[in-house]
Image (spheres, grey):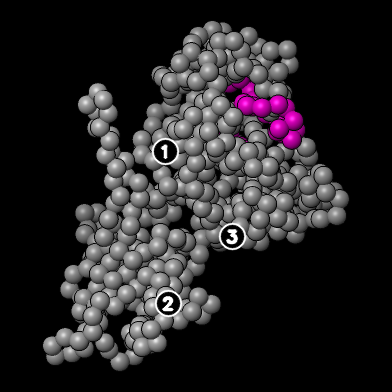
Amino acid sequence: MPFNLNYNQKAARKLLVTAVNAGTPDAPEWEVVGRGVQDSSIEFNPDIETVNDILGNTETDVKSFEMSQDLEPMTVRGGSKLALKIYDINKRRAYTEFAQFEVLLIFGYVSTPSDGFTAEKHINCTVTPQSEGGDAHVDMPITITFSGDKELGLVDKLTNGMTFRKEEMVWIPAFRNCDVLEDGDNELHPAFIVNGKPLAGIWIGKYQASDDGKGVPQSKYGQTPWTDINFDDAASKCAAKGKGWHLMTNAEWAAIALWCKKNGTQPKGNNDYGKDHTETEYVAEPATYGDDDRINLVKTGTGPVTWSHDGTENGIYDLNGNVWEWVDGLRLVWGEAQFKPNPGDDWKALDAATGKFVTPECKTTDTAVKASGSTVKLDRVGGVYTWGTGISTPTSNWESTAFGSVAYATGIGANAKKTLQLWGLGPDGTAADYKGDHFWAQTKYSERLPYRGGHWTYGADAGVFALILSNPRSYVNVGRGFRLAYYDA
């Protein structure tokens, strides 16, 4: 979602709005705070850690923000339900209730006329009165301490009584490579590092993206997935929602897939005409039918909890089947694996010996594969996709390998192999660990982009590790969709 400001226009302070719920979570009554307050800011209070190593280098990490806001004088006014609620809590000495407030932080300078204003709903915040009294009037200044437990969404207006509409996203806390790989190190998984900075976590669309009716992608229960969209359109529509919004990346997808495998919750899904191929009774709510009257797409999130990434109602749904999903940050160029480690980066290849990101050997302007080299490329050896440094058998047909059987040639060093595993491009265990998920690719072309998961016809071949690298970015199909993701930028 864009800034609603003209070029070089300054955002007026009144567009950054704080509202406190003076009602209940089930029946919210949002009251804007700040009337009579001349100056108030959201203080981030960053938790910064600085480390000096034995070589004299200084490294600084921002661990977290502990956000707060002071509002003074906050004169008591007739009709203020918030002032009355604070007075009542204090009168009853029910002090624990001061830590049970919901607070909206609304960015009135980030909006579109059709959607509303970008907002964050912070849950279990502390709202504490600092004093009561004053000179000519009764003042009751307050301090708001934000919990950091937030939901993303939109509000319809910037005044009292606004309505908050949640964007249905799932928070994935950051974890380390050793948490999901048998031989992983203590570094954060690549999904949680953006532009060299660690993230506390990422937000992933709970549901496959659907059209809100105005051409804006949403993550919402019970919708028909948005399909027949090419890669560039999917990526641009996600980014247009505003800073931090993006098409789910391959690194993010891989992080979740590895977490599922480690925790024994690899999800089922619509990979067999409305049901999972292992299930005989449950059928999700149909969204579309084929010419043979069999179910094709199902409505988002209408499957059982076995279709969510963690096996609960709070998980991410439909990562297995329903529609293949475009993911960003990965491609094949003439069979060479190329990556975008950070948003906006140039494409990088992977040095097979060192595992470092380097300048690619292959370009989209080339006219053929490279038979040899030093970067990681995808070959087909004995009918099996194999990561090596050259390509002896370029593929142009619809050929696949069971994901658990994808191989590594002897030229692939330990660090390169680990990177391929962390990006969900090769196994780190036995074939049985991957539930029959398959990997398709075409290496005889200038550029092929990825989509993951499977759709309603793929049966046992679909799954959270399933991957296709066989189509150009312009490809559109009723079985291809996408998913929103967000990180706090």
Q: Say which of 440 and 367 sits in front.
A: 440
Whether residue 333 is visible to the viewer of this picture, yes or no, is: no
Report how far apart the C-alphas of labels 2 and 3 lie in the structure: 32 Å
Residue 438, magenta (yes or no): yes
Label 2 sits on what residue type?
Glu
CB-based contact (under 8 Å), mark 2 and mark 3: no
At a point 33% along the width and 54% down the height, the residue shown is: 65
Q: Which mark is residue 305?
A: none
Where 439 falls versus 394 (above or below)?
Answer: below
Of the two numbered discs 1 and 3 in the rendering, the one whose residue sits closer to the viewer? 1
Name the outermost residue toward the left.
135
At a point 34% along the width and 90% down the height, the residue shown is: 79
Which SS class for mark 1? Answer: strand
Image location of residue 303, percent across then percent down: 72, 56
Image location of residue 483, percent across then percent down: 56, 48
Report how far apart the C-alphas of labels 1 and 2 lie in the structure: 37 Å
Give the mark, 1 or 3, whose residue is nearer the N terminus: 1
Q: Which residues are magenta?
A: 426-452
Give the mark, 1 or 2, whose residue is nearer the N terminus: 2
Query: What residue is pinned by disc 3?
Result: 220
Q: Which mark is residue 193?
A: 1
Q: Which mark is residue 97?
A: 2
Image location of residue 4, percent across then percent down: 32, 60
Q: Say which of 432 and 378 sits in front.
A: 432
Of the two numbered discs 1 and 2 in the rendering, the one whose residue sits closer to the viewer? 2
Label 3 sits on what residue type?
Lys
Q: Quadrant of residue 103?
A: bottom left
Q: Is residue 33 left or right of residue 275?
A: left
Q: Say which of 188 and 330 sits in front.
A: 188
Residue 134, magenta (yes or no): no
Q: Is residue 147 left or right of residue 431?
A: left
Which SS class for mark 3? Answer: loop
